[in-house]
Amino acid sequence: MIKKIINKLLGKSPAASGRGQKPSFGKREEIGAAVHGIDPELVDERALNVVRTLQDAGYEAYIVGGAVRDLLVGLRPKDFDVATDATPEQVKGLFRRAFIIGRRFRIVHVVYGRGREHEVIEVSTFRAYMDNAAAEQVAGNERTSKSELAGMKHAVDSSGRVLRDNVWGPQNEDATRRDFTINAMYYDPETQTVVDYHGGFKDVKKRVLRMIGDPATRYREDPVRIIRAVRFAAKLSALGFKLEAKTAGPLVKSHELLADVPQSRLFDEMLKLLQTGHALASIAQLKALGLARGIYPLLDVIVERAEQPFVNAALQDTDRRVGEGKPVAPSFLLACALWADVRDGWARRMAQRQHSHPALQDAIDEVFDARIGDVSGRGKLAADMREIWMMQPRFDKRVGSAPFGLVEQARFRAGFDFMRLRADVGEIDELLADWWQEFSTADDNLRQDLVDQVREEQQSRQRTRAPRVHTSPAADKPAADRPEPTVQADGAEAPPKKRRRRRRSGGAKSGGESASTPDTGE
């Protein structure tokens, strides 16, 4: 009490006065299968293999994080993470295909399978709680201070953001340094025991998202937790989860800290918001929490346009595909979000009599400069977006060899899906999308029939088109400029003189000279 009074007199906040002191590491609670009710059948066999391999080697090992939370609510987790007291080097030595990644947090990826069917189990080492006041401090951020950070295990920048955190410690400290209570539980699939230090099990039952420790301090340590709070609130809202008031309170004020986070990391976090199957819910949460603007410029655009039919259809389609277990590409969603800019820039240049193809290319370049910048490195993501956009006018060409070549393009399916969405919202004729749907799934003979049918329809329209009325040059002239008619002796107007027809030369008929060579009369 006396300490609180002194701090109040000195103008110190409780968070400030507590900085530099170790927090409560909680009390270990072990919850048995009869209480938690986790179905062992929902646990991935590969995650089980990682846990068993580590335990057989004499280490502690648990399934951890969101997978435990999902298991507790009866969901089959899409990803499984494992936590252990083995160091990254020790973990790597136990598995044939394991790779140490990351600088800020060193973790191990244990890989199963190959190609698109491969699965990664992420293994992290228990981390010690470290007082950020005692950490090594650097002046810049992770990018500008890369060489200075090379030999550091625990470092922060001037704002208190953690840049390195690779000091190993016991499980209870590892739990404390995690963000939300519902993500800080450990599950041993061998004994079917859940280990909880911070009341996460109770919060799951109450459907509460609560930050471990002081939320403002935790957001300052890692501002990306702001985006994670939004993402978890969106993902779990359908199950009735809500952000605790104290956890939600500092979000708006703390979002300015995101300005110091590397743009590439913000870009990745934006994609997680939009591509984990809860894009529309994430946008709704951003608006509800007062974070509709200011997190990331490109995200601002998507939130602003989320109600537009075309962008809304793309967001719904992304959520649907994720829900069905189908792959999604960031290039497609971003191409949809920025299509209005490309389309308007293209139309503006066409109105200025620029040729269609270079007009579209210039419009795309303008959008990249204004909206994308160098975040994606203009690599594959930018190339895929460009290809989707450049493909759109090619769908209008349905005769000759053009359709056969287009359907063989590597990005045809993405370009077609984009065009189909345009048709769904009425931007283009739906019959065009139906034709390409049939053409893309047909064999070569049927494809040729479809092309022939389009050609016949075009020729039929040309034949039935109203004939053009041609007027003689004399009829177009004013009456004063027309030649006077010849009058005969009886006063009647003489008939017009017939123009003498010039014969073509014999050489022209035989092909020896051009047919346009005049007859010289010789």
Image (tube, rainbow, N blue to C red):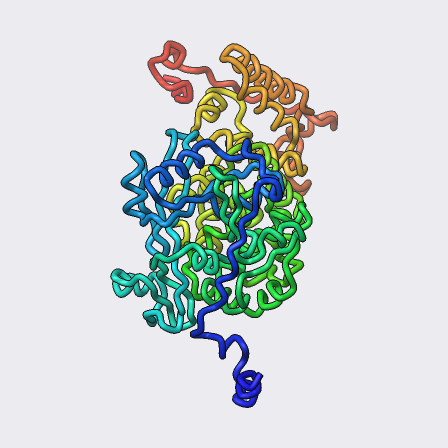
Q: Which residue is drawn at 54% across and 30% down?
A: 395
Nearest the eye: 292 or 393: 292
| Residue 468 shown left or right of residue 81 in the figure | right
| Residue 269 shown left or right of residue 487 in the figure | left
- Position of the C terminus by quadrant: top left
Q: Residue at x 32, y 70 (%)?
A: 136
Q: Which residue is drawn at 64% across and 61% down?
A: 244
- Position of the N terminus by quadrant: bottom right
Q: How many marks?
A: 0
Nearest the eye: 144 or 110: 110
Residue 466: percent from the left, percent from the top? 69, 25
Give above or below for 471 relative to 273.
above
Residue 241: percent from the left, percent from the top? 65, 51
Within the image, what quadrant is residue 122 found in?
Answer: top left
Give above or below for 51 relative to 272.
above
- The answer to whether residue 356 shows anywhere in this view is no
Q: Which residue is drawn at 48% across and 29% down?
A: 412
- The answer to whether residue 239 shows anywhere in this view is yes
Within the image, what quadrant is residue 476 found in?
Answer: top right
Give above or below for 518 relative to 37.
above
Query: In the orientation shown, which residue stands out farthest toward the bottom?
Result: 9
Give above or below for 162 relative to 466.
below
Residue 517: percent from the left, percent from the top? 39, 22
Nearest the eye: 3 or 376: 3
Residue 318: percent from the left, percent from the top? 58, 39
